[in-house]
Image: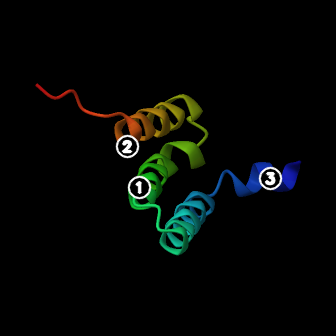
């Protein structure tokens, strides 16, 4: 458990997750993968410093922005 706590306190962990999502998205042709990776990368500063409220909010709103359709008139 300590190992996970240490890893998730490092910014490189979140950047690695973002890069992995980018690679998987490229292999599977998921066109939203770059935006998901960007949301994780942007939240990495807050998440790695232990500010899970801000980091989590950034991730959730970023994912909503990716997957929600815009209203058209």
Q: CA distance from mark 3 to mark 2?
A: 28 Å
Residue that badge 3 annotates: 4
The C terminus, quarter of image = top left
Mark closer to the chain start, 2 or 1: 1
**Residue furthest toward the right?**
1
Of residue 23 and residue 39, the one placed in the foreground of this image is 23
Q: Residues within 10 Å of mark 1 (few under 14, many from 20)?
A: some
Instruction: Report if the CB atoms under discs 2 and 1 are less than 8 Å apart.
Output: yes
In this picture, is 30 found above or below 54? below
Seen at 58% across and 49% down, the residue is: 48
Residue that badge 1 annotates: 32
**Residue furthest toward the left?**
73
Say the numbered circle drawn on residue 66.
Answer: 2
Residue 28, position in %: x, y? 54, 68
- Is residue 9 toward the left or the right of residue 67 in the image? right
- Is residue 12 toward the left or the right of residue 2 in the image? left
Q: CA distance from mark 2 to mark 1?
A: 7 Å
What sort of colour scheme is used for the picture?
Answer: rainbow
Instruction: Report if the CB atoms under discs 3 and 2 are less than 8 Å apart.
Output: no
Seen at 37% across and 43% down, the residue is: 66
Please tell me whether mark 3 sits on a helix, a strand or a loop.
helix
Please tell me whether mark 2 sits on a helix, a strand or a loop.
helix
Instruction: Report if the CB atoms under discs 3 and 1 are less than 8 Å apart.
Output: no
Mark closer to the chain start, 3 or 1: 3
Q: Residues within 10 Å of mark 2 (few under 14, many from 20)?
A: some
Seen at 47% across and 68% down, the residue is: 29
Seen at 58% across and 34% down, the residue is: 52
**Residue furthest toward the front?**
73
Residue 61, position in %: x, y? 41, 33
- Is residue 53 toward the left or the right of residue 64 in the image? right
Residue 12, position in %: x, y? 58, 64
């Amino acid at each position: 458990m300590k190992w996970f706590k240490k890893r998730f306190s490092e910014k490189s962990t979140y950047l690695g997750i973002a890069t992995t999502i980018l690679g998987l998205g490229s292999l599977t042709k998921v066109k939203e993968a770059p935006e998901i990776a960007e949301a994780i990368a942007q939240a990495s500063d807050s998440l790695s410093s232990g500010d899970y409220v801000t980091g989590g909010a950034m991730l959730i709103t970023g994912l909503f922005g990716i997957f929600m359709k815009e209203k058209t008139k």
